[in-house]
Image (spheres, rainbow, N blue to C red):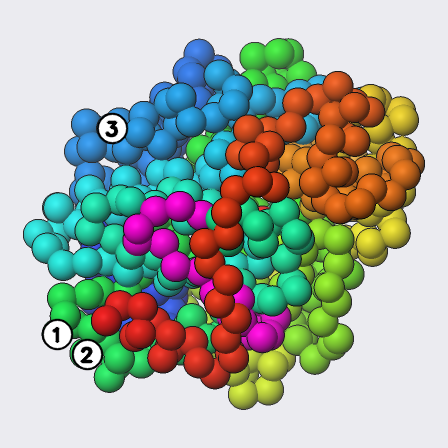
Amino acid sequence: MITYHSTRGGGSALSSAAAIIQGLAADKGLFVPDTIPALPLPLAAFSDLSYQEVAEAIIGAFFTDFSKEEISSCVHAAYDGRFATDEIVPVRAVGNTHVMELYHGPTSAFKDMALSILPHLMTTARKKCGETGTICILTATSGDTGKAALEGFADVAGTEIIVFFPNAGVSPVQQRQMQTQEGANTHVFAIKGNFDDAQRGVKAIFNDPELAARLAQADIKLSSANSINIGRLVPQVAYYVYAYSRLVKDGSLACGEPMNAVVPTGNFGNILAAWYAGRMGVPIGKLICASNANRVLTDFLRTGVYDTHRPFHLTNSPSMDILVSSNLERLLYALAGDDAEEIRSLMAALDQSGRYEVSAAIRDGLSSFYGGFADPQETLDTIGQVFRTHGYLLDTHTAVAWKVYEDYVRETGDETPAVIASTASPFKFSGDVAKAIGLAAAADEFADLRALTAATGLPVPTGLADLETKPLRHTGIIEKSDMAATVEEVLK
Ligand SMILES: *Cc1c(COP(=O)(O)O)cnc(C)c1O
C-alpha cells in the first residue's frame, strides 16, 4: 500500500483516504506519497483507453487503499455527463503544437478536472475512515478554484464549504459565478486583501489548534479543496498520460518519444502533476513553466532563489496572480531526496524573510524545467495573433503559456512535440479576449460574451450563459483579519 506523509517530516504515515480528509499535514507540510507508482499499464496501452479509463488507472495506482470499484464510481460520478464535450479533454492540433483543452467542465476552467472528483473521493474516504461528522471545506481562491469547489461540493451530504476570494482580485464573471452559487451548504466571502492574504488566512485557520478543538466538539473537521490536497493533485496526473496517449494515437509521437509540456502556472499544482506523470514513466521532456507579470517562478527557475519581495501585480490572467506557489514544496522535497529537514529550513526562511535559496542538488533537479513569463500586453497580443493566424481562440492564461512556449522554441531550437495545457475557456475572460481580437469595448463582460459568440461562432458555455440573470446569494465582504471568526460564525 502507498502511504502518505508530510513534506516536513511530522506525524505518521497515513492512508490516502486519511490524507485526503485531513488536507494539510499537522506540521503545515503537504502530503506526498512514499513512492510515486510506475504506470500501471504499458505506455502504448493508454492509447486505447477513454479519458475515464485512464483516470481510473492513474488514480488507482496512487490511492491503493481505495478499491477498484470505489475509484471507478468516483471517476464516473465526476466526469460522466458533466462535461460539455464527450471526450472529456479534447487535444487539438493548432499550428505546430497541440492544445489540451482542460476547461470543458461545469465552471469552464481546468479546476473542474480535479474538483469534480474531489468531493466523491472525500465522501468515499469519510466512509472508509468511519467518520460521521461534518467535513467543512475551506478554500482560498484566485478565482477559479472557488467556483469549481462550490460546484463540486454543493449539497454533498456531510459537507459544508466556505470560500474566500480577494475583493477586486477576480474577474467580474468569476465573482458572479461564485456569488450566485446555489446549495444550502455553500458560503462565499470577499476579503479585503489579495490571494496570498486569503491563502495565508486559510492556512492560519488550519493551524489553529484551539479553533480545531472547538469545532471538534461540534463534530466538525476542516479540510481543504486547494491544490495542497493530494486528492486534487493526483487526478490531474491523468490528463498528461491521456494527452501523451492521444499524440501517439494521432501519429504526432512514436510511443516512447519525449513530449514537452507547457503549463500556465500559479500555485504549481498543474505543472507538478506533469512532473509526477514523468516520474510514473510518461516520457516528458521539458516542463515549461509559464508565469504572468508575477514572475517569481521564472526568476526562481533561473537563479535558484525564491524571493517574494516584489510588487504584486493584478494582471489579465488573475488565476496566476500568486507570489507563494504552495505546491513547489512537494517538488523541492522530492528533489532534496525526501529530506524533510531541508524543507523545514527552506519554509522557515520563507516564513521569516520571504525568501530562500535552494541547494546545488535541488538546482540540478530543476534543470528539467524552463521558466518564462508574459506581461499583460504580450498576453493580449498573443491572443490576437493566434486567432488571426490559426482561427483558434485562447483565454488569457493559455495565451501566457503560448507566448512563453514561443520564447522557449526561439531560444533553444527544441522542436520536440509539445502539449500546451489550456486552463480556461476564452469566454471566462471575455472582456480581455474580446479586446485582444479587436472587438469594440462592450458595456460589460456579459455583453462581451455575446460579442465573442457573434465574432467567432463559438457557443457561450452553459454555466456562463445564465449568469447575468441569476440572483446574487453571497455578497459579504470581510477584513482579512476576520476570516477565522467568520468560519466559526458560519458553522454555529
Ligand atoms: C488555477 C489556474 C491556473 C494555475 O494553476 P496552478 O495549478 O495553480 O499552477 C492557471 N490557469 C487557470 C485558468 C487557473 O484557473
Between 433 and 327, the one nearer to me in the picture: 433
100 with respect to 83 (left or right) = right
Q: Is residue 104 above or below residue 185?
A: above
Which image quarter is the C terminus in?
Answer: bottom left
Q: Is residue 313 above or below residue 229?
A: below
- Residue annotated with mark 3: 73
Residue 377, image x, y percentages: 88, 52
* Residue type indicated by callout 2: Arg
Magenta span contains residue 184: yes
The segment highlighted magenta reads: 181-198
- Determine whether the residue tagged by mark 1 lies in a helix, strand or loop: helix
Residue 467, image x, y percentages: 57, 40
Which image quarter is the N terminus in?
Answer: top left
In the rendered image, is residue 116 in sight?
yes
- Residue annotated with mark 2: 214
Q: Hey, which residue is sitting farthest bottom in the picture?
A: 352
- Residue annotated with mark 1: 217
* Residue type indicated by callout 1: Gln
* Residue type indicated by callout 3: Ser
User: Which label sits on residue 286?
Assistant: none
Near mark 2 (Cα within 10 A), the count class, few <14, some 14-19 or many ≥20, is few
